[in-house]
Amino acid sequence: MSLLTERKSLRCMIVPIVLALLVGCSGENTDDLNLYVNEIKSRKPVTIVPLPKPVIYEAYDYQSDSQRDPFKEAFKQGKVASKQGNLGKGGPDLSRARGYLEGFPLDGLSFHGSIQLGDGLWGLVKTPDGALVRVKTGDYLGQDYGKVASIGEGGIELRELISDGLGGWERRDVTLAHSE
């Protein structure tokens, strides 16, 4: 069979197929389509819920005179001691038995006042489990080796020792303020 006869036979097969498709697309029996369109048009319009209003950005004016510089190290007092041989050199006494209040993070403890007993001033600290505990100067609280430096009517001053992540310790002064 030659190439010319193959092309003629291919045309003879394609032409009837195309004509059949065209005839199938034409037609006047579109009643079901018209019914569907009319049904859609007769439906009640749906109300669209409006978009929520965008949140307006409020600029924050950073006043560096009353706050620390966020781009400088948080610890200003410098390194207190290295972790190797820290006993007696400003680091925490790791051989000391830890107290009850050292089992709670400092943000879980709250200062609830002070009382004068004898010649000393005691602070009242409430734990997350609801216990009210008396503390005096020299006691420890929090998980960062926080030692009570002073107790006043407004709160408890602590000196914490924080690991600097480089093998040393840094001191941080913290106040456990009176909670309302």
Image (tube, rainbow, N blue to C red):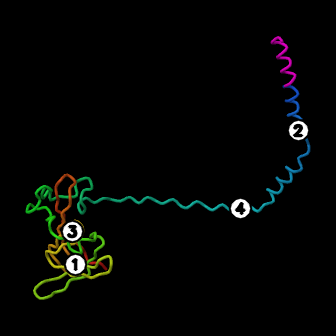
Tell me the number on the disc at residue 24.
none
Measured as percent of width and height from the top left, residue 125 is found at 25, 79
Q: Amino acid at mark 3?
A: Val
At 88% from the left and 37% from the top, the residue drawn is 24
Of 162 and 179, nearer the camera is 162
> Is there a contact, CB below 8 Å, between mark 2 and mark 3?
no
Q: Which residues are magenta?
A: 1-13
Tell whether position 11 is magenta: yes
For marks 2 and 3, give the CA distance.
86 Å
Quadrant of the rendering where the N terminus is positioned: top right
**Depicted 125 relative to depicted 78: above or below:** below
Which dot, 3 or 1, sits closer to the camera? 3
* Residue designated by label 1: 154
Q: How many discs appear?
A: 4
- Residue 27 quadrant: top right
Label 1, secondary structure: give it: loop
> Is there a contact, CB below 8 Å, between mark 2 and mark 4?
no
Measured as percent of width and height from the top left, residue 33 is found at 85, 49
For marks 2 and 1, give the CA distance.
91 Å
Of 3 and 23, nearer the camera is 3
For marks 4 and 1, give the CA distance.
61 Å
- Residue 154 quadrant: bottom left
Name which of mark 2 and mark 3 comes first in the sequence: 2
Measured as percent of width and height from the top left, residue 168 is found at 16, 55
Tell me the number on the disc at residue 174.
3
Q: Give the crowd class for mark 3: few <14, some 14-19, many >=20 residues within 10 Å.
A: some
